[in-house]
Each structure stands twice: as C-alpha cells, then as structure tokens.
Amino acid sequence: KEMDGMFCANFSKLHRGFNLCRNVWHIECYTCLGQGQFPMAKQIDMLGNVWFKHDQQEHRNRMNHGIRWAHASLLFHCESCWTMNLEGRLPIKGLDQTYIMLIWRVNLDIMNGRATATLKSHAALVVRTA
C-alpha cells in the first residue's frame, strides 16, 4: 500500500539534545488509545440535520484511526516529541499513559479535521516535488 506510513514531523532530526526521532506508524495501527473515553457526539448543522447519517459507524471508525496522507501536509508529532516540546523531557513509561492517550487523541483530531481529498491532493504535490 502506498503512503500507509505516518512519520513524525521530527523524523531523523535531533530534538532538543535527545536522540533522533524514529517514530513511524502504519495508519491502521495508529488508533485511539482511549476508545470509549472520548465523547463522539453526532455532528449536526444549525438546522439540526445529522452529518454522516448513513455512515455513522464508518465515521466513528475514521475518527479513531490514522488517516492516509495526513503526515504529508499536517505537522504530525509523536508523543515523544510532543512531551519534549511541552515538558522538556521524554515520556515516562507508566507515569504518562494518560498524557500519551490525550496526545494521540489530539493527533487523530488534527488528522480528521481535513477532508480526505484535501490530504490526498497535498500528498500528490509532495510526491511530485520529490
């Protein structure tokens, strides 16, 4: 599958004196770590019309998984880089589990904030210039 990997924006870069970031995921493996803990209300417009009324399950599935092409146009950061930016340290195993879960949710929300066609067109431009 083409471009099914998601790379951290800091991939292969030294970050604040820490080791090189080597974080990459397959899009199907980057999933919401707290499924069921984050509300997934039905989205409605100003008139009360429900969006995605035919594909609610598909929409929920999309909201909880990585999106193909997202890393090509969005500033996607892994939990290690987010923690280094916010706390000046690497995540601590066992201590930062909730923190990491929230970071993954934020990343998924960022990815899902763009239409798939937009992400695909940005990725095509990246491929063309490479």
Image (tube, helix red, strand yellow):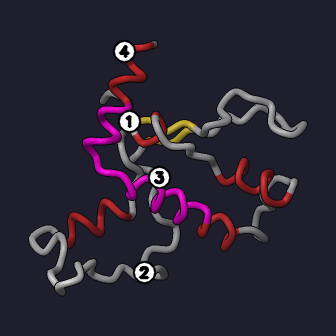
Marks 2/1: CA distance?
25 Å
106 magenta-colored:
yes
Label 1 vs 3, first from the N-terminus: 1
According to the picture, the residue beneath numbered tag 1 turns out to be 4
Expressed as whole percent of the image width and height from the top left, the position of residue 93 reads 77, 62
Looking at this view, name the residue that lies furthest to the right: 17
According to the picture, the residue beneath numbered tag 3 turns out to be 30
Q: Residues within 10 Å of mark 3 (few under 14, many from 20)?
A: some
Q: Residues within 10 Å of mark 2 (few under 14, many from 20)?
A: few
Q: Residue at x 42, y 42 (%)?
A: 70
Label 2 vs 1, first from the N-terminus: 1
- Per the rendered image, the range of residues in magenta is 103-122
Please, is residue 121 above or below residue 77 in the view?
Answer: above
According to the picture, the residue beneath numbered tag 4 turns out to be 128
Residue 75 occupies quadrant? top right
**In the picture provided, is 94 more to the left or to the right than 73?**
right
Label 4 vs 3, first from the N-terminus: 3
Label 4 vs 2, first from the N-terminus: 2
Q: Name the element at disc 4.
A: helix
| Mark 4 vs mark 2: in front | 4
According to the picture, the residue beneath numbered tag 2 turns out to be 36
Marks 1/3: CA distance?
11 Å
Q: In the rendered structure, which amino acid carries the disc numbered 4?
A: Arg
Please, is residue 52 above or below residue 22 in the view?
Answer: below
Pointer 2 and pointer 1: residues touching (CB < 8 Å)? no
Q: In the rendered structure, which amino acid carries the disc numbered 3?
A: Tyr
Q: Which label is found at residue 121?
A: none
Marks 4/2: CA distance?
39 Å
Pointer 2 and pointer 3: residues touching (CB < 8 Å)? no
